[in-house]
Image (spheres, rainbow, N blue to C red):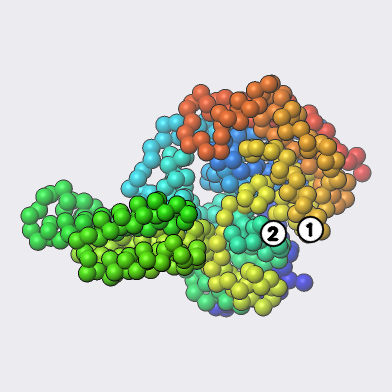
Amino acid sequence: MASNATGKGEVKVRISKALSEGEKAATAARKEEVKKGLGKLGIPCNEDQIPNIAVLGSGGAVRAMIALYGTLAELKKYNLLDCVMYLGGVSGSTWCISALYKHEDWAEKIEALEKSQCETLVKGQWEFQKAMKAVIGAAEDECYSLTDFWSYFLVHKLLNELDESELPVHRGACENGKNPYPIYNAVDKETYEQQHAGTWFEFTPHEAGVPGLGAYVDMKHFGSIFENGQLTEEKKKRDICYLQDSLLNYLKQKRSGDSSSTSTNLDQDDQKLKTLYEGYQSILELHLCETSDGRTADKHFDHLRNILKNHSSSRSYELLREICKTWFSANAETRKKDCMRLCQALDLDFGGFSSDSLRVLHDVVRKTYLCLLNWTWGSTNNFLYHCLDVECPDLTSKQVVSLIDAGLAINAAYPSLLQSERKVKLILSFDFSAGDPFLTIKKAIKYCEEHGIPFPKIDERELQDTDDLKDCYIFRGDAECVPTVVHCPLFNKVNCSDKIHEYREQFSTFKMSYSKEEIEKLLTAAKQNVANVHEKILEEIKNVVGPPS
Protein backbone atom coordinates (compact mmCIF):
# COMPACT_ATOMS: atom_id res chain seq x y z
CA MET A 1 0.00 0.00 0.00
CA ALA A 2 1.36 3.38 -0.96
CA SER A 3 1.88 6.05 1.67
CA ASN A 4 2.64 9.71 1.19
CA ALA A 5 4.49 12.35 3.14
CA THR A 6 2.91 15.74 2.69
CA GLY A 7 4.10 19.28 2.87
CA LYS A 8 2.49 22.67 2.29
CA GLY A 9 -0.89 21.11 1.65
CA GLU A 10 0.00 18.73 -1.18
CA VAL A 11 1.76 15.42 -1.72
CA LYS A 12 5.51 15.82 -2.08
CA VAL A 13 7.22 12.52 -1.33
CA ARG A 14 5.70 9.25 -2.52
CA ILE A 15 6.57 6.10 -0.57
CA SER A 16 5.65 3.21 -2.84
CA LYS A 17 7.26 0.87 -5.34
CA ALA A 18 4.34 1.33 -7.72
CA LEU A 19 4.94 3.26 -10.92
CA SER A 20 4.07 6.95 -10.92
CA GLU A 21 0.74 8.01 -12.41
CA GLY A 22 2.66 9.86 -15.10
CA GLU A 23 4.63 6.76 -16.10
CA LYS A 24 1.48 4.63 -16.06
CA ALA A 25 -0.28 7.02 -18.41
CA ALA A 26 2.75 7.37 -20.70
CA THR A 27 3.36 3.62 -20.98
CA ALA A 28 -0.36 2.97 -21.55
CA ALA A 29 -0.27 5.37 -24.49
CA ARG A 30 2.95 3.78 -25.73
CA LYS A 31 1.40 0.32 -25.52
CA GLU A 32 -0.95 1.17 -28.38
CA GLU A 33 2.01 2.17 -30.53
CA VAL A 34 3.94 -0.97 -29.58
CA LYS A 35 1.01 -3.11 -30.66
CA LYS A 36 1.03 -1.39 -34.05
CA GLY A 37 4.81 -1.86 -34.23
CA LEU A 38 4.48 -5.59 -33.56
CA GLY A 39 1.89 -5.75 -36.30
CA LYS A 40 4.38 -4.23 -38.76
CA LEU A 41 6.74 -7.09 -37.90
CA GLY A 42 4.04 -9.69 -38.52
CA ILE A 43 3.59 -10.43 -34.82
CA PRO A 44 -0.13 -10.19 -34.00
CA CYS A 45 -0.90 -10.27 -30.29
CA ASN A 46 -3.65 -9.60 -27.81
CA GLU A 47 -3.56 -6.68 -25.38
CA ASP A 48 -2.31 -8.86 -22.52
CA GLN A 49 0.49 -10.30 -24.67
CA ILE A 50 2.18 -7.00 -25.53
CA PRO A 51 5.65 -7.28 -23.95
CA ASN A 52 7.60 -4.49 -22.33
CA ILE A 53 10.86 -4.26 -24.26
CA ALA A 54 13.71 -2.04 -23.09
CA VAL A 55 16.76 -0.66 -24.87
CA LEU A 56 19.78 0.07 -22.70
CA GLY A 57 22.58 2.35 -23.86
CA SER A 58 25.76 2.10 -21.82
CA GLY A 59 28.17 4.88 -20.92
CA GLY A 60 31.23 5.78 -22.94
CA ALA A 61 31.28 9.59 -23.29
CA VAL A 62 30.96 10.97 -26.83
CA ARG A 63 31.55 7.50 -28.30
CA ALA A 64 28.41 6.24 -26.53
CA MET A 65 26.35 9.26 -27.56
CA ILE A 66 27.21 8.87 -31.26
CA ALA A 67 26.81 5.08 -31.19
CA LEU A 68 23.38 5.30 -29.55
CA TYR A 69 22.18 7.69 -32.25
CA GLY A 70 23.28 5.17 -34.89
CA THR A 71 21.77 2.25 -32.96
CA LEU A 72 18.36 3.90 -32.56
CA ALA A 73 18.29 5.01 -36.20
CA GLU A 74 18.97 1.45 -37.37
CA LEU A 75 16.42 -0.03 -34.96
CA LYS A 76 13.90 2.34 -36.53
CA LYS A 77 14.93 1.23 -40.03
CA TYR A 78 13.97 -2.36 -39.15
CA ASN A 79 10.75 -1.29 -37.34
CA LEU A 80 12.20 -2.55 -34.03
CA LEU A 81 12.22 0.84 -32.30
CA ASP A 82 8.42 0.98 -32.63
CA CYS A 83 8.23 -2.04 -30.29
CA VAL A 84 10.34 -0.54 -27.49
CA MET A 85 8.61 0.57 -24.27
CA TYR A 86 11.59 1.85 -22.26
CA LEU A 87 14.86 3.60 -23.12
CA GLY A 88 17.46 3.66 -20.34
CA GLY A 89 20.86 5.27 -20.30
CA VAL A 90 23.85 6.19 -18.18
CA SER A 91 26.69 8.62 -18.79
CA GLY A 92 27.35 9.32 -22.49
CA SER A 93 24.15 7.63 -23.67
CA THR A 94 22.11 10.13 -21.67
CA TRP A 95 23.59 12.95 -23.78
CA CYS A 96 21.86 11.38 -26.76
CA ILE A 97 18.60 10.61 -24.92
CA SER A 98 18.18 14.06 -23.37
CA ALA A 99 18.73 15.70 -26.76
CA LEU A 100 16.16 13.46 -28.44
CA TYR A 101 13.36 14.13 -25.95
CA LYS A 102 13.32 17.82 -26.77
CA HIS A 103 11.42 16.62 -29.89
CA GLU A 104 7.95 15.18 -29.34
CA ASP A 105 8.20 12.97 -32.43
CA TRP A 106 11.90 12.10 -32.31
CA ALA A 107 11.38 8.39 -33.09
CA GLU A 108 9.86 9.34 -36.44
CA LYS A 109 12.70 11.63 -37.43
CA ILE A 110 15.66 9.96 -35.74
CA GLU A 111 17.74 9.94 -38.93
CA ALA A 112 17.41 13.70 -39.39
CA LEU A 113 18.19 14.31 -35.71
CA GLU A 114 21.24 12.05 -35.91
CA LYS A 115 22.53 14.03 -38.89
CA SER A 116 21.87 17.36 -37.16
CA GLN A 117 23.66 16.29 -33.97
CA CYS A 118 26.69 15.07 -35.89
CA GLU A 119 26.89 18.38 -37.74
CA THR A 120 26.77 20.18 -34.40
CA LEU A 121 29.63 18.04 -33.08
CA VAL A 122 31.78 19.03 -36.05
CA LYS A 123 30.71 22.60 -36.73
CA GLY A 124 28.97 23.79 -33.57
CA GLN A 125 30.28 26.76 -31.60
CA TRP A 126 31.27 26.73 -27.97
CA GLU A 127 29.62 29.77 -26.39
CA PHE A 128 31.96 30.64 -23.52
CA GLN A 129 29.91 33.59 -22.24
CA LYS A 130 26.74 31.49 -22.17
CA ALA A 131 28.54 28.72 -20.28
CA MET A 132 30.02 31.23 -17.85
CA LYS A 133 26.61 32.72 -17.09
CA ALA A 134 25.22 29.24 -16.44
CA VAL A 135 28.05 28.39 -14.03
CA ILE A 136 27.62 31.71 -12.21
CA GLY A 137 23.94 30.94 -11.75
CA ALA A 138 24.70 27.46 -10.47
CA ALA A 139 27.33 28.78 -8.03
CA GLU A 140 24.67 30.85 -6.28
CA ASP A 141 23.19 27.62 -4.95
CA GLU A 142 24.63 26.19 -1.75
CA CYS A 143 24.72 22.77 -3.49
CA TYR A 144 27.07 23.92 -6.26
CA SER A 145 29.48 21.12 -7.19
CA LEU A 146 31.94 20.00 -9.84
CA THR A 147 29.00 18.49 -11.74
CA ASP A 148 27.79 22.02 -12.54
CA PHE A 149 31.23 23.04 -13.76
CA TRP A 150 31.58 19.80 -15.77
CA SER A 151 28.15 20.18 -17.37
CA TYR A 152 28.39 23.83 -18.37
CA PHE A 153 32.02 23.89 -19.45
CA LEU A 154 33.42 20.48 -20.32
CA VAL A 155 30.33 18.67 -21.65
CA HIS A 156 29.22 21.87 -23.36
CA LYS A 157 32.68 22.13 -24.95
CA LEU A 158 32.60 18.47 -26.05
CA LEU A 159 29.12 18.63 -27.59
CA ASN A 160 29.33 22.22 -28.89
CA GLU A 161 25.91 23.02 -27.47
CA LEU A 162 24.39 23.83 -24.11
CA ASP A 163 21.20 21.96 -23.21
CA GLU A 164 19.23 24.24 -20.91
CA SER A 165 15.99 22.24 -20.94
CA GLU A 166 14.63 20.60 -17.79
CA LEU A 167 13.50 16.99 -17.49
CA PRO A 168 9.78 17.73 -16.88
CA VAL A 169 9.74 19.49 -20.28
CA HIS A 170 10.28 16.03 -21.82
CA ARG A 171 6.90 14.78 -20.59
CA GLY A 172 5.19 15.65 -23.85
CA ALA A 173 7.60 13.47 -25.81
CA CYS A 174 6.65 10.38 -23.82
CA GLU A 175 3.02 11.02 -22.88
CA ASN A 176 1.97 11.10 -26.53
CA GLY A 177 2.95 7.43 -26.94
CA LYS A 178 5.17 8.14 -29.94
CA ASN A 179 8.45 7.41 -28.15
CA PRO A 180 9.76 4.97 -25.52
CA TYR A 181 9.66 6.08 -21.88
CA PRO A 182 13.10 7.47 -20.85
CA ILE A 183 14.92 6.62 -17.62
CA TYR A 184 18.18 8.23 -16.47
CA ASN A 185 20.34 7.07 -13.57
CA ALA A 186 22.93 8.23 -11.06
CA VAL A 187 24.44 6.68 -7.92
CA ASP A 188 25.31 7.91 -4.44
CA LYS A 189 29.02 8.74 -4.39
CA GLU A 190 29.44 7.44 -0.83
CA THR A 191 27.84 4.00 -1.34
CA TYR A 192 28.25 3.11 -5.03
CA GLU A 193 30.94 0.52 -4.29
CA GLN A 194 28.68 -1.35 -1.84
CA GLN A 195 25.47 -0.71 -3.82
CA HIS A 196 22.78 -1.13 -1.16
CA ALA A 197 19.10 -0.40 -1.72
CA GLY A 198 19.63 3.35 -1.41
CA THR A 199 22.50 3.66 -3.90
CA TRP A 200 20.74 3.90 -7.27
CA PHE A 201 18.74 7.02 -8.11
CA GLU A 202 16.58 7.27 -11.22
CA PHE A 203 15.13 10.25 -13.05
CA THR A 204 12.18 10.24 -15.43
CA PRO A 205 10.21 13.16 -16.87
CA HIS A 206 7.76 12.67 -13.99
CA GLU A 207 9.73 11.71 -10.88
CA ALA A 208 13.11 11.38 -9.25
CA GLY A 209 13.54 8.57 -6.81
CA VAL A 210 15.30 5.61 -5.29
CA PRO A 211 13.72 2.48 -6.79
CA GLY A 212 15.37 0.12 -4.31
CA LEU A 213 13.59 1.93 -1.46
CA GLY A 214 10.38 2.82 -3.27
CA ALA A 215 10.74 6.54 -2.52
CA TYR A 216 10.01 9.23 -5.09
CA VAL A 217 9.41 12.94 -5.48
CA ASP A 218 7.88 14.90 -8.33
CA MET A 219 10.70 15.94 -10.67
CA LYS A 220 9.80 19.63 -10.25
CA HIS A 221 10.60 19.35 -6.52
CA PHE A 222 13.89 17.51 -6.88
CA GLY A 223 16.59 19.68 -5.34
CA SER A 224 14.20 21.41 -2.93
CA ILE A 225 14.68 21.02 0.81
CA PHE A 226 12.77 18.27 2.64
CA GLU A 227 12.74 16.91 6.14
CA ASN A 228 10.90 13.78 7.23
CA GLY A 229 9.24 13.62 3.84
CA GLN A 230 7.85 17.14 4.03
CA LEU A 231 8.81 20.04 1.84
CA THR A 232 10.32 22.79 3.97
CA GLU A 233 11.74 25.08 1.30
CA GLU A 234 10.91 25.22 -2.40
CA LYS A 235 14.03 26.00 -4.40
CA LYS A 236 13.36 28.56 -7.11
CA LYS A 237 14.65 28.20 -10.63
CA ARG A 238 17.87 30.04 -11.15
CA ASP A 239 17.48 33.36 -12.89
CA ILE A 240 20.85 34.62 -14.13
CA CYS A 241 19.72 37.24 -16.62
CA TYR A 242 20.58 40.06 -14.24
CA LEU A 243 24.24 39.04 -14.36
CA GLN A 244 24.59 39.88 -18.02
CA ASP A 245 24.57 43.65 -17.51
CA SER A 246 27.06 43.64 -14.64
CA LEU A 247 29.51 41.47 -16.57
CA LEU A 248 29.15 43.55 -19.73
CA ASN A 249 29.54 46.78 -17.79
CA TYR A 250 32.75 45.49 -16.23
CA LEU A 251 34.16 44.54 -19.64
CA LYS A 252 33.16 47.92 -21.10
CA GLN A 253 34.94 49.72 -18.29
CA LYS A 254 38.08 47.68 -18.91
CA ARG A 255 38.02 48.37 -22.64
CA SER A 256 37.35 52.08 -22.26
CA GLY A 257 40.67 52.75 -20.49
CA ASP A 258 38.91 55.09 -18.05
CA SER A 259 41.52 56.86 -15.90
CA SER A 260 39.04 57.64 -13.13
CA SER A 261 39.06 56.18 -9.66
CA THR A 262 36.74 53.47 -10.99
CA SER A 263 39.50 52.32 -13.33
CA THR A 264 42.00 52.34 -10.45
CA ASN A 265 39.65 50.20 -8.36
CA LEU A 266 39.21 47.77 -11.25
CA ASP A 267 42.99 47.41 -11.60
CA GLN A 268 43.25 46.70 -7.89
CA ASP A 269 40.42 44.19 -8.20
CA ASP A 270 42.22 42.50 -11.07
CA GLN A 271 45.38 42.15 -9.01
CA LYS A 272 43.51 40.70 -6.06
CA LEU A 273 41.67 38.20 -8.29
CA LYS A 274 45.00 37.19 -9.86
CA THR A 275 46.48 36.61 -6.39
CA LEU A 276 43.47 34.51 -5.36
CA TYR A 277 43.51 32.45 -8.54
CA GLU A 278 47.23 31.70 -8.33
CA GLY A 279 46.93 30.98 -4.61
CA TYR A 280 44.00 28.58 -5.06
CA GLN A 281 45.86 26.82 -7.88
CA SER A 282 49.01 26.31 -5.79
CA ILE A 283 47.02 25.10 -2.79
CA LEU A 284 45.18 22.57 -4.94
CA GLU A 285 48.44 21.30 -6.44
CA LEU A 286 49.93 21.09 -2.95
CA HIS A 287 46.94 19.04 -1.81
CA LEU A 288 47.23 16.66 -4.78
CA CYS A 289 51.00 16.15 -4.71
CA GLU A 290 52.52 12.99 -3.25
CA THR A 291 53.41 13.63 0.40
CA SER A 292 56.57 11.56 0.08
CA ASP A 293 57.85 13.88 -2.65
CA GLY A 294 59.29 16.69 -0.56
CA ARG A 295 60.73 18.53 -3.57
CA THR A 296 57.28 18.83 -5.19
CA ALA A 297 55.67 20.12 -1.99
CA ASP A 298 58.53 22.58 -1.44
CA LYS A 299 58.03 23.90 -4.98
CA HIS A 300 54.38 24.70 -4.22
CA PHE A 301 55.30 26.28 -0.88
CA ASP A 302 57.90 28.44 -2.65
CA HIS A 303 55.30 29.52 -5.20
CA LEU A 304 52.86 30.48 -2.44
CA ARG A 305 55.58 32.48 -0.65
CA ASN A 306 56.32 34.30 -3.89
CA ILE A 307 52.62 35.11 -4.40
CA LEU A 308 52.41 36.53 -0.88
CA LYS A 309 55.87 38.15 -0.69
CA ASN A 310 54.42 41.67 -0.71
CA HIS A 311 51.88 40.75 1.97
CA SER A 312 54.12 39.39 4.73
CA SER A 313 51.87 40.76 7.47
CA SER A 314 48.74 39.09 6.09
CA ARG A 315 46.88 36.21 7.74
CA SER A 316 47.61 34.10 4.68
CA TYR A 317 51.37 34.53 4.98
CA GLU A 318 51.42 33.78 8.70
CA LEU A 319 49.29 30.66 8.21
CA LEU A 320 51.51 29.52 5.34
CA ARG A 321 54.57 29.71 7.59
CA GLU A 322 52.74 27.69 10.25
CA ILE A 323 51.61 25.00 7.77
CA CYS A 324 55.11 24.63 6.30
CA LYS A 325 56.48 23.60 9.70
CA THR A 326 54.05 20.70 10.19
CA TRP A 327 53.17 19.62 6.63
CA PHE A 328 55.46 16.59 6.32
CA SER A 329 54.55 15.14 9.71
CA ALA A 330 50.80 15.70 9.31
CA ASN A 331 48.34 13.02 8.18
CA ALA A 332 46.17 13.33 5.05
CA GLU A 333 43.12 14.70 6.86
CA THR A 334 45.16 17.39 8.65
CA ARG A 335 46.82 18.45 5.39
CA LYS A 336 43.41 18.73 3.73
CA LYS A 337 42.15 20.92 6.61
CA ASP A 338 45.28 23.06 6.34
CA CYS A 339 44.59 23.62 2.64
CA MET A 340 41.01 24.61 3.42
CA ARG A 341 42.20 27.03 6.15
CA LEU A 342 44.70 28.60 3.75
CA CYS A 343 41.98 29.13 1.14
CA GLN A 344 39.79 30.80 3.75
CA ALA A 345 42.67 33.05 4.81
CA LEU A 346 43.22 34.10 1.19
CA ASP A 347 39.53 34.96 0.92
CA LEU A 348 39.71 37.15 4.02
CA ASP A 349 42.86 38.91 2.81
CA PHE A 350 42.01 39.43 -0.86
CA GLY A 351 38.29 38.73 -1.27
CA GLY A 352 36.89 42.26 -1.18
CA PHE A 353 36.04 43.72 -4.62
CA SER A 354 34.65 47.08 -5.71
CA SER A 355 33.12 45.48 -8.82
CA ASP A 356 29.91 43.46 -8.39
CA SER A 357 30.79 41.30 -11.37
CA LEU A 358 34.20 40.39 -9.94
CA ARG A 359 32.61 39.55 -6.60
CA VAL A 360 30.40 37.09 -8.50
CA LEU A 361 33.34 35.72 -10.49
CA HIS A 362 35.41 35.29 -7.33
CA ASP A 363 32.56 33.34 -5.74
CA VAL A 364 32.53 30.92 -8.69
CA VAL A 365 36.31 30.45 -8.63
CA ARG A 366 36.39 30.01 -4.84
CA LYS A 367 33.56 27.46 -4.80
CA THR A 368 35.02 25.49 -7.70
CA TYR A 369 38.41 25.17 -6.00
CA LEU A 370 36.78 24.13 -2.72
CA CYS A 371 34.84 21.47 -4.64
CA LEU A 372 38.11 20.26 -6.14
CA LEU A 373 39.75 20.10 -2.71
CA ASN A 374 36.81 18.07 -1.36
CA TRP A 375 36.15 16.24 -4.66
CA THR A 376 32.48 17.26 -4.45
CA TRP A 377 30.24 16.02 -7.26
CA GLY A 378 26.50 16.06 -7.90
CA SER A 379 25.52 17.78 -4.66
CA THR A 380 21.78 18.13 -4.22
CA ASN A 381 19.38 18.46 -1.31
CA ASN A 382 18.32 15.00 -0.16
CA PHE A 383 14.53 14.68 -0.31
CA LEU A 384 14.77 11.65 2.04
CA TYR A 385 16.60 13.54 4.79
CA HIS A 386 15.32 12.27 8.16
CA CYS A 387 12.46 10.48 6.38
CA LEU A 388 11.05 8.08 8.99
CA ASP A 389 9.14 6.06 6.36
CA VAL A 390 12.42 4.90 4.79
CA GLU A 391 14.84 2.47 6.46
CA CYS A 392 18.23 3.39 5.06
CA PRO A 393 20.31 5.36 7.60
CA ASP A 394 23.23 5.78 5.19
CA LEU A 395 20.95 7.86 3.00
CA THR A 396 18.37 9.42 5.32
CA SER A 397 21.04 10.80 7.67
CA LYS A 398 22.43 13.08 4.93
CA GLN A 399 20.94 16.52 4.31
CA VAL A 400 22.85 16.73 1.02
CA VAL A 401 23.58 13.78 -1.23
CA SER A 402 26.33 13.63 -3.87
CA LEU A 403 25.23 11.86 -7.06
CA ILE A 404 27.75 10.66 -9.62
CA ASP A 405 27.85 8.84 -12.96
CA ALA A 406 26.02 5.51 -12.59
CA GLY A 407 28.51 3.99 -15.02
CA LEU A 408 31.00 3.82 -12.14
CA ALA A 409 28.76 1.24 -10.51
CA ILE A 410 27.18 -0.62 -13.46
CA ASN A 411 27.65 0.83 -16.93
CA ALA A 412 24.02 0.19 -17.88
CA ALA A 413 20.71 0.97 -16.19
CA TYR A 414 19.82 -2.58 -15.15
CA PRO A 415 18.71 -1.75 -11.57
CA SER A 416 15.93 0.55 -12.84
CA LEU A 417 14.76 -1.55 -15.77
CA LEU A 418 14.69 -4.76 -13.72
CA GLN A 419 12.14 -3.38 -11.26
CA SER A 420 9.35 -5.95 -11.15
CA GLU A 421 6.75 -3.17 -11.49
CA ARG A 422 8.03 -2.34 -14.98
CA LYS A 423 7.48 -5.93 -16.15
CA VAL A 424 10.28 -5.83 -18.71
CA LYS A 425 10.42 -9.10 -20.67
CA LEU A 426 13.24 -8.35 -23.11
CA ILE A 427 16.31 -6.13 -22.68
CA LEU A 428 18.30 -5.05 -25.72
CA SER A 429 21.64 -4.05 -24.21
CA PHE A 430 23.94 -2.09 -26.50
CA ASP A 431 27.31 -1.96 -24.82
CA PHE A 432 29.52 0.97 -25.82
CA SER A 433 31.99 0.44 -22.96
CA ALA A 434 35.75 0.58 -23.14
CA GLY A 435 37.61 -2.48 -21.90
CA ASP A 436 35.80 -5.66 -20.87
CA PRO A 437 32.58 -5.80 -22.97
CA PHE A 438 30.99 -8.18 -20.42
CA LEU A 439 31.70 -6.12 -17.31
CA THR A 440 28.20 -4.64 -17.26
CA ILE A 441 26.72 -8.15 -17.42
CA LYS A 442 29.00 -9.42 -14.63
CA LYS A 443 28.13 -6.48 -12.40
CA ALA A 444 24.43 -6.82 -13.17
CA ILE A 445 24.56 -10.50 -12.18
CA LYS A 446 26.24 -9.62 -8.87
CA TYR A 447 23.78 -6.79 -8.16
CA CYS A 448 20.78 -9.01 -8.86
CA GLU A 449 22.11 -11.83 -6.68
CA GLU A 450 22.65 -9.45 -3.75
CA HIS A 451 19.22 -7.85 -4.09
CA GLY A 452 17.12 -10.88 -4.96
CA ILE A 453 16.27 -9.69 -8.48
CA PRO A 454 15.59 -12.30 -11.18
CA PHE A 455 18.26 -12.38 -13.92
CA PRO A 456 19.02 -14.98 -16.61
CA LYS A 457 21.40 -17.78 -15.67
CA ILE A 458 24.64 -17.30 -17.61
CA ASP A 459 27.45 -19.72 -18.27
CA GLU A 460 30.55 -17.79 -17.21
CA ARG A 461 32.50 -19.40 -20.05
CA GLU A 462 30.51 -17.21 -22.43
CA LEU A 463 31.97 -14.13 -20.76
CA GLN A 464 35.63 -15.08 -21.06
CA ASP A 465 36.65 -14.15 -24.59
CA THR A 466 36.91 -10.37 -24.74
CA ASP A 467 39.04 -10.22 -27.90
CA ASP A 468 37.16 -12.57 -30.27
CA LEU A 469 33.74 -11.08 -29.72
CA LYS A 470 30.51 -12.06 -31.40
CA ASP A 471 28.05 -9.33 -32.35
CA CYS A 472 25.30 -10.68 -30.14
CA TYR A 473 24.97 -12.76 -26.95
CA ILE A 474 21.54 -13.99 -25.94
CA PHE A 475 20.90 -14.83 -22.28
CA ARG A 476 17.39 -16.24 -22.09
CA GLY A 477 15.09 -15.93 -19.15
CA ASP A 478 11.61 -17.35 -18.86
CA ALA A 479 8.36 -15.82 -20.03
CA GLU A 480 7.04 -15.17 -16.54
CA CYS A 481 9.51 -13.41 -14.24
CA VAL A 482 13.03 -13.54 -15.71
CA PRO A 483 13.71 -11.28 -18.71
CA THR A 484 15.80 -12.25 -21.71
CA VAL A 485 18.90 -10.12 -22.31
CA VAL A 486 20.32 -9.55 -25.78
CA HIS A 487 23.82 -8.14 -25.25
CA CYS A 488 25.52 -6.44 -28.22
CA PRO A 489 29.14 -5.21 -27.85
CA LEU A 490 29.80 -2.20 -30.09
CA PHE A 491 33.12 -3.40 -31.49
CA ASN A 492 33.16 -7.09 -32.45
CA LYS A 493 34.64 -9.49 -35.00
CA VAL A 494 31.61 -9.16 -37.29
CA ASN A 495 31.50 -5.39 -37.80
CA CYS A 496 35.20 -4.70 -37.10
CA SER A 497 36.75 -7.90 -38.46
CA ASP A 498 40.26 -8.24 -36.96
CA LYS A 499 40.49 -4.54 -36.06
CA ILE A 500 38.68 -4.53 -32.69
CA HIS A 501 41.72 -3.13 -30.85
CA GLU A 502 42.20 -0.50 -33.54
CA TYR A 503 38.61 0.71 -33.09
CA ARG A 504 38.93 0.74 -29.31
CA GLU A 505 42.08 2.84 -29.48
CA GLN A 506 40.72 5.26 -32.07
CA PHE A 507 37.45 5.83 -30.19
CA SER A 508 38.68 5.93 -26.60
CA THR A 509 36.47 7.20 -23.79
CA PHE A 510 38.69 10.25 -23.35
CA LYS A 511 38.62 11.27 -27.00
CA MET A 512 37.54 14.90 -26.82
CA SER A 513 36.78 15.75 -30.46
CA TYR A 514 35.57 13.95 -33.56
CA SER A 515 36.01 14.72 -37.25
CA LYS A 516 33.21 14.14 -39.74
CA GLU A 517 35.00 11.03 -41.03
CA GLU A 518 35.42 9.60 -37.52
CA ILE A 519 31.76 10.17 -36.71
CA GLU A 520 30.72 8.40 -39.91
CA LYS A 521 33.04 5.48 -39.15
CA LEU A 522 31.61 5.09 -35.64
CA LEU A 523 28.01 5.40 -36.85
CA THR A 524 28.68 2.76 -39.50
CA ALA A 525 29.97 0.31 -36.87
CA ALA A 526 26.93 0.91 -34.63
CA LYS A 527 24.46 0.58 -37.49
CA GLN A 528 26.11 -2.54 -38.90
CA ASN A 529 25.80 -4.11 -35.49
CA VAL A 530 22.03 -3.66 -35.50
CA ALA A 531 21.71 -4.72 -39.14
CA ASN A 532 23.65 -7.90 -38.39
CA VAL A 533 21.56 -8.91 -35.37
CA HIS A 534 18.10 -7.57 -36.22
CA GLU A 535 16.76 -11.00 -37.18
CA LYS A 536 17.94 -12.45 -33.87
CA ILE A 537 16.23 -9.61 -32.03
CA LEU A 538 13.05 -10.27 -34.00
CA GLU A 539 13.13 -13.94 -32.96
CA GLU A 540 13.52 -12.99 -29.30
CA ILE A 541 10.55 -10.62 -29.58
CA LYS A 542 8.47 -13.47 -30.99
CA ASN A 543 9.61 -15.67 -28.11
CA VAL A 544 8.54 -13.23 -25.40
CA VAL A 545 5.21 -12.51 -27.11
CA GLY A 546 4.44 -16.19 -27.48
CA PRO A 547 1.77 -17.76 -29.69
CA PRO A 548 -1.58 -15.95 -30.10
CA SER A 549 -4.01 -17.01 -27.38
The outermost residue toward the left is 259
Residue located beneath label 1 in the image: 450
Residue 375 as seen in the image, left or right of residue 88: left
Q: Nearer the viewer, residue 415 or 220?
A: 415
| Image quarter of residue 71 | top right
Three-letter amino acid code at disc 1? Answer: Glu
Residue at which label 2 appears? 195
Which residue: 28% across, 66% down?
Answer: 317
- Give the vertical position of 255 relative to 538 (above or below): below
Q: Could one spot residue 410 in this view of the protein? A: yes
Q: Secondary structure at mark 1?
A: helix
Question: Is the Cβ of the residue at disc 2 closer than 8 Å to that at disc 1?
Answer: yes
Rendering coords of residue 263 (x, y %): 12, 57
The quarter of the rendered structure image containing the C terminus is top right
For image coordinates 36% across by 61% down, the residue present is 366
Please state which of residues 357 and 335 is positioned toward the viewer in this rendering.
Answer: 335
Name the residue rendered at 43%, 39% in the picture.
160
Residue 398 drawn at (x, y percent): 58, 71
Q: Is 293 on the left or on the right of 343, as rendered?
A: right
Q: Residue at x 7, y 58 (%)?
A: 260
Residue 77 appears in the figure: no
Query: Which image quarter is the N terminus in?
Result: bottom right
Q: Secondary structure at mark 2?
A: loop
In the picture, residue 8 is in which quadrant? Answer: bottom right
Q: CA distance from mark 2 to mark 1?
A: 9 Å
**Callout 2: few (<14), some (14-19), or many (20+) C-alpha neighbours within 10 Å?**
some
How many residues crowd around disc 1 within 10 Å: few (fewer than 14), some, or many (20 or more)?
few
Residue type at the position of mark 2: Gln
Pinpoint residue 129: horizontal percent, then vertical percent. Answer: 33, 48
Circle nearer the N terminus (2, 1): 2
Residue 299, numbered circle: none
